Image (cartoon, grey):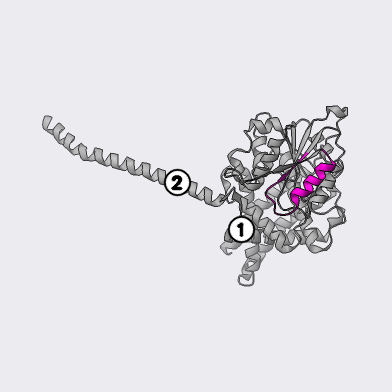
Amino acid sequence: MPLLALVTLLLALGYAVVAAVLVLTLRRPEPWAEPLAAAPHEWPDVDVVVPARDEADTLPATLASLAAQDYPGRLRFLVVDDRSQDDTARLVQRAAASDQRFELVRVETPSRRLAPKVNAVSHGIAAGSAPWIVTTDADCLHPRGWLRALVAAGESHVMVTGYVETARPGEARGLFRKVEALDWISLMLTNRALVRLGASVASAASNQAYRRSAFDALGGFGVAGRAPSGDEDLLTQRLGALPGAGVAYTDAEDARVLTASAGSWGGFLAQRRRWVSRYHHPQHYHPGFLAGIVLLGAHSVCLSVSTLAVPWWPESLPWLLGSWGLVLAVVLSGMHLGLSRLGRDDLRGWPVLAWALLHPLLIATAVIWSVVRPGSWHAGADDYRGRAWRAWVRRALRRARRRSLGRSRVGARRQRRPQRTEARNVRW
């Protein structure tokens, strides 16, 4: 058996075991939070932060969905214009003129300490004062009861991560839109399972809420804010690590946010390449989270390469079929169970099979593409990768200088030793 087939089979076995553990959590009922039975004035104040950069095309629909929220507490919509070159700022000003809950926050200069989007969110948080902070994106649509459902789910937690999808039930037309919708659903189901298992490691910045007191206890985004996911995955991991803190997940129907589709296979792969490029800077991530990401990437690459290599190594076909069988058995059952729980019967059947067969190839393409041409994540005016590399070089040079100084001192002592030894011998 070729070595590649053996490695593929072992990775498929590991992937299937992890997936099976996550699937088992889907059989447990979801403890959706009931709406708070309190007077309107008892609902906490909320600041909704919306970072926007050149979002004039999608922003009007987003602002309209926010304005329609039926949340009974005090609301402020802090839309952060991150140096846009289009009419983003003017659209926010127009919304603020007709609805006093909207406020324009401007980012004038990039930060040398925070990634651009993290910096924009930080500006929005600083402009507000409410005890709850909610973040979303400028290309999202929100149900009328979104904020009510999100805040209700976090009544006894420091953070709530919410469900995000690219197509409402029945709206996914064609192979691409169905595969894209299923890929997002797989991410949401994974996050749901991890939270139920006590692992608060991931979130989507387009649908999350957290307490300002917990955010302040962390000291803000901190050094993790240099990373592109400093306002979502890394923030979730840090908040979840606070003493006595808990992170909740909700996919209640009113809490589901609709985000814009990538539009095409190329756009989808480019988006996933940017996501994978985040993990090229592993120093901030939880080790278990990174291990899962590495397992997914390695499994997808090996399975795709092994499948494409069958014409040249036909003897590996039985082992390859075993690898595919392991993966498909767990993934198909888990996805159908998850879709049933979410009420997404429109995606059951052949779309799930198509997604399961394409998923390893799509992930492998994104992984390889991110290595050949990493996503252009920046921390302020300087490239984050370049800053991290230069910091590593500086540390290496300092260690080398210390070792060099240490060797020179040891050498000097050794040069003096024979003289002292000779003197001692004479004295003895």
Estimate the x, y position of residue 14 in percent, counting from the top left. 65, 51
Crowding at dot 2, Cα within 10 Å, few <14 / some 14-19 / many 20+, comes out as: few
What are the residue bounds of the magenta stretch? Answer: 77-100
Of callouts 2 and 1, the N-terminal one: 1
Q: Is residue 93 magenta?
A: yes
Estimate the x, y position of residue 63 in percent, counting from the top left. 81, 46
Query: Does any portion of residue 418 appear in the rendered image?
Result: yes
Element marked by disc 2? helix
In the drawing, does residue 300 fall left or right of residue 342?
left
Element marked by disc 1? helix
Residue located farthest toward the left when viewing the structure as drawn? 426
Task: Tell me if label 2 and label 1 are in contact, CB under 8 Å.
Answer: no
In the drawing, does residue 326 fall left or right of residue 283?
right
In the picture, which quadrant includes the N terminus?
Answer: bottom right
In the picture, which quadrant includes the C terminus?
Answer: top left
Q: Which mark is residue 370?
A: 1
Estimate the x, y position of residue 184 in percent, counting from the top left. 76, 52
In the drawing, does residue 246 fall left or right of residue 101?
left
Residue visible at 63% across and 55% down in the picture? 297
Say above or below: 137 vs 12. above
Q: Which mark is residue 394?
A: 2
To which quarter of the image does residue 198 belong?
top right
Residue type at numbered disc 1: Ser
Query: Does any portion of residue 337 appear in the rendered image?
Result: no
Residue visible at 65% across and 68% down in the picture? 308
**Cα distance between the residues tagged 2 and 1:** 26 Å
